Image (cartoon, rainbow, N blue to C red):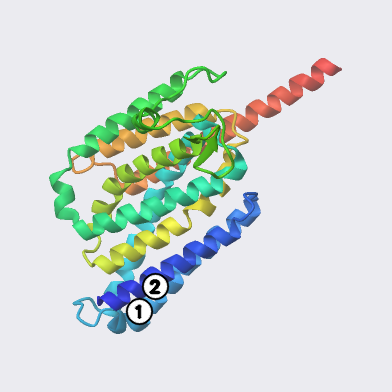
Amino acid sequence: MTPSMYISFFVLTLLMVALDIYQTRGGNITIRKAAVWSVFWFLSAFLFAGTIFLFWDFYAPTSEYTPLKATISFLTGYLLEKSLSVDNLFVFAIIFHQYTVPKHLRPRALLWGVIGALVLRALMITVGVQLLEQFHWVMYLFAAFLIWTGVQLARESDDGEEEISPLPERLIRRMVPISDEFRGNSLSVVENGKRIFTPMLVVIGVIAFMDIMFALDSIPAIFAVTREPFLVLAANVFALLGLRSLYFVLEGMLNRFVYLKPALSFIMIFIGIKMALVGTAWEIPTWVSLTTILMTMTVATVASIYKERRQAVTSVSEDV
């Protein structure tokens, strides 16, 4: 790949991010709108795959890959990254639940999270999987953090008095003063001549921390599919671009769950165990991870619907 081609793809990425920002303006995103845009981003990835097949010799004239091999590698990597990104969605849900982020502020917080993920993954792709393998032990720390977070979430009282205080939050609060309330999308405001930062900074800091963790998990995984840097980068970009819309589809369903907390707690612990087993003989395949998450949320959904209907019947009986 020539530098000019990378620059062109960078410009394309900026345009797609700008489109994503435009379609989420105002902060009020319905499930229907989020679902439509999720399909749009999914189809966009396959459209780009078509351009790889048709113009691969133009994209990478010195590559050893044939157009067909390059297309298959991109689609495989994209679907892999899309599957792994499901983990991110549930972590975002936990972060927003923890910090009581208002709904109209969540698109902006997710935007910063996606941009952070794009930058971090681009850097890690540049560094290469060899260097990541040398620091594989770091993943065990992240796995322990995830499991601990899941346990803390399970122990959290319903009235919210017990709260998770992750390392990024503690570091941010030690470095700068944080206000008690959000101030719109602002990261900082000036009060009484003194600049203070808002909880939005904490939320973005925690999301960035989780981005690093998931990048350490997903980048080595896609390098197992292809070592062509441009295909790895493109697959990550398209997988992450639709992440915000997909989250709001998920959120529209999660808000109706009575058993949201225990389901998310189990998922966090499961993801932590999955991360700890990466690279071992007991490594959990991606399809098993995705199936487990979907089954967990299905059980939580069915149980929530059953409980809601049972409470409605009980309420009607008491009124009679």
Contact flag, marks 1 and 2 (Cβ < 8 Å): yes
Q: CA distance from mark 1 to mark 2?
A: 6 Å
Q: Above or below — where is 271 with respect to 114?
A: above
Percent position (x, y) of residue 105? Answer: 57, 43
Q: Is 202 on the left-hand or right-hand side of 31?
A: left
Q: Residue beneath label 1, please?
A: 53
The residue sitting at 31% across, 54% down in the picture is 121
If the image is split into quadrants, where does the N terminus sit? bottom left
The answer to which image quadrant residue 222 occupies is bottom left
- Residue most toward the front? 193
Q: Above or below — where is 314 with respect to 57?
A: above
Q: Is 148 on the left-hand or right-hand side of 90?
A: left
Q: Above or below — where is 155 with respect to 260?
A: above
Q: Amino acid at mark 1?
A: Phe
Percent position (x, y) of residue 317? Answer: 80, 18
Q: Nearer the viewer, residue 49 or 98?
A: 98
The crowding category of the residue bearing disc 2, from other C-alpha atoms within 10 Å (few below 14, some 14 to 19, many at least 20), is many
* Residue 281 shows up from this direction: yes
Q: Above or below — where is 135 with respect to 80?
A: above
Q: Nearer the viewer, residue 59 or 298?
A: 59
The crowding category of the residue bearing disc 1, from other C-alpha atoms within 10 Å (few below 14, some 14 to 19, many at least 20), is some
**Could you tell me which secondary element the residue under label 1 belongs to?**
helix
* Residue 252 shows up from this direction: no
The residue sitting at 33% across, 67% down in the picture is 74
Q: Amino acid at mark 2?
A: Ala
Percent position (x, y) of residue 269? Answer: 36, 30
Q: Residue beneath label 2, please?
A: 49
The residue sitting at 49% across, 30% down in the picture is 98
